[in-house]
Amino acid sequence: MNGKLFVIGIGPGDPELLTLKAVRILERVPTLCVPKGREEGTSLALSIVRQAVNIDGTDIIEAHFPMRKTRNHGSEKQQPQGDAQLVQKWESTAEEIISRLQQGTDVAFITLGDPAIYSTFFYLHDVLLQRLPGVAIEFVPGITSVTAAAARAGISLGLGDENIAILPATYAGDIRTVLAGFDTVVLMKVHSVFKDIFPVLKELHLEDNCVYVARAGMPDERIVFDIGAITADDLDYFSILIVRTRRPHARP
Amino acid sequence: MNGKLFVIGIGPGDPELLTLKAVRILERVPTLCVPKGREEGTSLALSIVRQAVNIDGTDIIEAHFPMRKTRNHGSEKQQPQGDAQLVQKWESTAEEIISRLQQGTDVAFITLGDPAIYSTFFYLHDVLLQRLPGVAIEFVPGITSVTAAAARAGISLGLGDENIAILPATYAGDIRTVLAGFDTVVLMKVHSVFKDIFPVLKELHLEDNCVYVARAGMPDERIVFDIGAITADDLDYFSILIVRTRRPHARP
């Protein structure tokens, strides 16, 4: 009997934003798979879990996911790699997970935020389904950085008949069309494209309808309504810009 | 010294999806404000909290929020009311909250899902800010029904450079334009418009790229990939349709 794979969203950074379900599973699962996508060495996801759950003695699989190439290489320290290398990394991580599952051991893959919102887990997903058909996978949703940023800024993302667009920093389409068609536009990991986006917002007279949130809920969080005052110091990998196109945020 | 108002997202229905932070605050706050928007009488939000937290002895303010008029009155049992009546209800609820806060009592307003995602709390927000300027409000994000539905269906909402649109059932714009411009389109509370949306999806050959999720994580949850087979019985107020426009969901 194979083990079960749990894919657990651990929220955006504040350990108190783990769910009861995430804690229950993390307390008992014998193996954790921890993505390490950035160069820093330490895993932010693992340090968040450690603050909420005692995982001493838990077997840890470290999954080094190199970053994908992105459109823009601003302040982000990325090591763009070819797709072949990426696929090889995912495959070797998948093999590590599969070998534990085949021994009957449950594994929890932890992911910042929520698994469905831009989590690298889904690159692994296809490999797992191919290599171990019928593998039991349970997804545990997490608090997204999007709603955490809204909560910290004290704003609504949508109300009544309003619509919401979520765009990644690598979005290649026309931002003006999206701003024209949506009440709220959320730009994820905006740090690398902020200098390109700001002039557009200014031109459309939307610069007062924005809030920038970096590292929501973390000790060094930044919340900036006056986005014209954002400096290079404010720009952070974990950054979100929320634009209200029809009416400005009610500032607290 | 006035009390503090906590606005707490309690997730979509599974009591285990409350966060540690929500539980900690709900365990100690002396007054809960509980929205009751529908006719059923019992408050779903309150019953979810009761399953995770002992709130015996907590003072409960029941806030009866009549539903707003929506574009479509399909299977939803709504009592549309004029805006004046709505505003009056919000104002009387705001007064109840304010009187507790002015006595120095903390109050927690609980909301299904997340406060930033279509929560009626924000109708109350403006009234509170006007009546009690400088009122201390802390928002606690919750698991949204959107990511809970994706988790239960085992799918991603966005990966890499993909974009995501979230539309309320009352969306008045052109759904075809949104389907053409976004990788993932999430239709909230789709039950009342499903019969209008399905022919459009079929015409665009997208009917195999959808998943319908009702009451995600609740005992009577429904997950339907073959949306042509959805019957009136499947349609529920707490329903979401997730459409992938470029490539179908990897079905589990």
Image (tube, coloured by chain):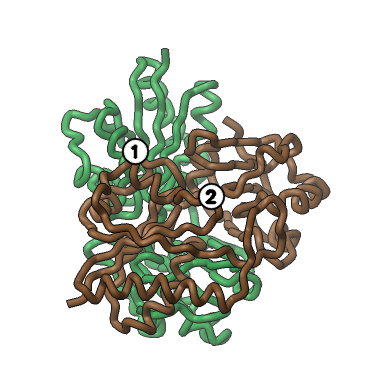
Chain colours: A green, B brown
Residue at 49% of width from left, 67% of height from top?
A157
Of residues B183 and B34, the one nearer the viewer is B34
Q: CA distance from mark 2 to mark 1?
A: 28 Å
Question: The C terminus of chain B is located in which quarter?
Answer: top right
Tag 2, which secondary structure?
loop
Tell me: residue A198, above or below residue A174: below
How packed mark 2 is, by other alpha carbons closer than 10 Å (few <14, some 14-19, many 20 or more), is few
Q: Position of residue B216 (x, y in %)?
A: 52, 41
Same chain letter for marks 2 and 1: no
Question: The N terminus of chain B is located in which quarter?
Answer: bottom left
Q: Position of residue B235 (x, y in %)?
A: 66, 43
Residue with the mark numbered 1: A21
Residue at the extreme top: A1
Residue at 24% of width from left, 66% of height from top?
B106
Residue at 42% of width from left, 44% of height from top?
A141
- Is residue A36 in view? no
Residue with the mark numbered 2: B40
Q: Badge 1 sits on which subunit?
A: A
